[in-house]
Image (spheres, rainbow, N blue to C red):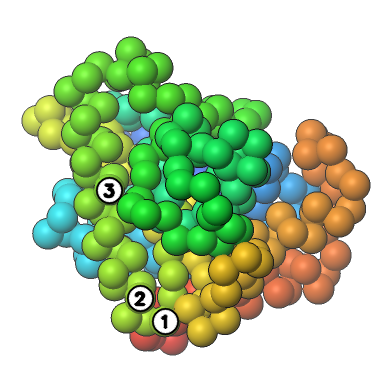
């Protein structure tokens, strides 16, 4: 098995290079997406990669695309490595439809956590959405809320309210992605509960396909895009242990780093523990042994 992959250089025309994924044009007009092992935290990419991370992200997305196919269509075409491309792509690549990406990060929050908790402490609201008084860190919200942000290729995504979101993408598109996001979150959270996991929050990305249909794009419900908590150790009022990047974020909060590039180097034990958490998240949610 190949080691840590932090960059790719394929004999294909590049389409985009994100914080984690490298995407290329295929001759047939579709896109070839590769999940690297790069780690991004606080929207900064780190010098070290996290072993197995790209494969976990890809395999988790594949699991959820299949699980949610009755709720929403997605961009997946194939998981095969095209002829002539290197073997290290196995398990970390997807051939996908080329879609017109809707420029919103579609965030759904079901619990008080992270930046939402900080916002609530200051304003009594999350992203301008008023919430009841007396909620604590990790409290379950009265109902899931939709708090979109702008998509940033570099730097920090920025939370924007409903009015700005409607202006950005139009009323009809806004309402469709809002309603889809809430439906997907509810379906995924209900399933995760049966596996002993709380889906605290997540973010989705949507695109418009050639037929004009809004479909899921990029990754879905991975430890990179979602906050997962073990239900057995959940307790209101404290930040629960997590299966996601929160482990790295919590470590970074102790370092004095100003959350601006360049990112600091991560200790070997933090990287190893992060791999273990990602793999455990996959195995707990799917009920299967991680295949790589």
Measured in 3D between alpha carbons, the distance from the residue under mark 3 to the one under mark 2, in whole angstroms, is: 16 Å
Q: Which mark is residue 182?
A: 3
Measured in 3D between alpha carbons, the distance from the residue under mark 3 to the one under mark 1, in whole angstroms, is: 21 Å
Q: Secondary structure at mark 3?
A: helix
Q: Residue furthest left?
A: 211
Left or right: where 242 falls relative to 179: right
Residue drawn at x 43%, y 25% as measured from the top left: 161
Measured in 3D between alpha carbons, the distance from the residue under mark 2 to the one under mark 1, in whole angstroms, is: 5 Å
Category of crowding for the residue at label 3, using alpha-carbon neighbours closer than 10 angstroms: few (below 14), some (14–19), many (at least 20): many
Horizontal and vertical percent position of residue 229: 52, 70
* Visible residue check, residue 54: no
Q: Secondary structure at mark 2?
A: helix
Q: On the image, numbered disc 1 is attached to which residue?
A: 196
Residue drawn at x 60%, y 58% as measured from the top left: 137
Q: Secondary structure at mark 1?
A: loop
- Closest to the observer, 112 or 9: 112
Q: On the image, numbered disc 2 is attached to which residue?
A: 193
Q: Is residue 260 above or below residue 189?
A: above
Residue drawn at x 22%, y 52% as measured from the top left: 183
Horizontal and vertical percent position of residue 160: 47, 25
Category of crowding for the residue at label 1, using alpha-carbon neighbours closer than 10 angstroms: few (below 14), some (14–19), many (at least 20): some
Picture quadrant where residue 153 is located: top right
């Amino acid at each position: 098995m190949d080691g840590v992959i932090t960059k790719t250089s394929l004999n294909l025309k590049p389409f985009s290079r994100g914080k984690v994924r490298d995407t290329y044009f295929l001759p047939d007009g579709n896109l070839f997406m590769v999940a690297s092992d790069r780690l991004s935290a606080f929207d900064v990419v780190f010098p070290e990669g996290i072993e197995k991370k790209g494969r976990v992200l890809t395999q988790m997305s594949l699991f959820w695309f299949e699980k949610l196919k009755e709720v929403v269509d997605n961009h997946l075409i194939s998981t095969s490595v095209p002829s002539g491309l290197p073997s290290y792509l196995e398990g970390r690549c997807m051939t996908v439809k080329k879609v017109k990406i809707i420029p919103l990060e579609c965030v759904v929050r079901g619990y008080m956590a992270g930046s939402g908790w900080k916002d609530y402490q200051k304003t009594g609201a999350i992203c301008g959405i008023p919430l009841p008084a007396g909620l604590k860190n990790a409290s379950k919200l009265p109902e899931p809320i939709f708090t979109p942000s702008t998509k940033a290729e570099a730097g920090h995504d920025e939370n924007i309210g409903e009015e700005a979101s409607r202006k950005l993408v139009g009323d009809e598109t806004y309402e469709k992605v809002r309603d889809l996001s809430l439906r997907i979150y509810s379906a995924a959270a209900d399933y995760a509960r049966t596996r002993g996991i709380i889906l605290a929050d997540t973010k989705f990305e949507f695109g418009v396909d050639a037929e004009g249909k809004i479909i899921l794009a990029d990754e879905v419900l991975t430890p990179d895009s979602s906050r997962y908590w073990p239900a057995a150790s959940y307790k209101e009022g404290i930040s629960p242990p997590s299966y996601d990047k929160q482990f790295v974020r919590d470590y970074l909060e102790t370092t004095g780093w100003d959350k601006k590039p360049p990112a600091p180097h991560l200790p070997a034990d933090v990287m190893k523990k992060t791999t273990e958490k990602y793999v455990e998240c996959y195995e707990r949610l799917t009920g299967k042994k991680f295949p790589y």
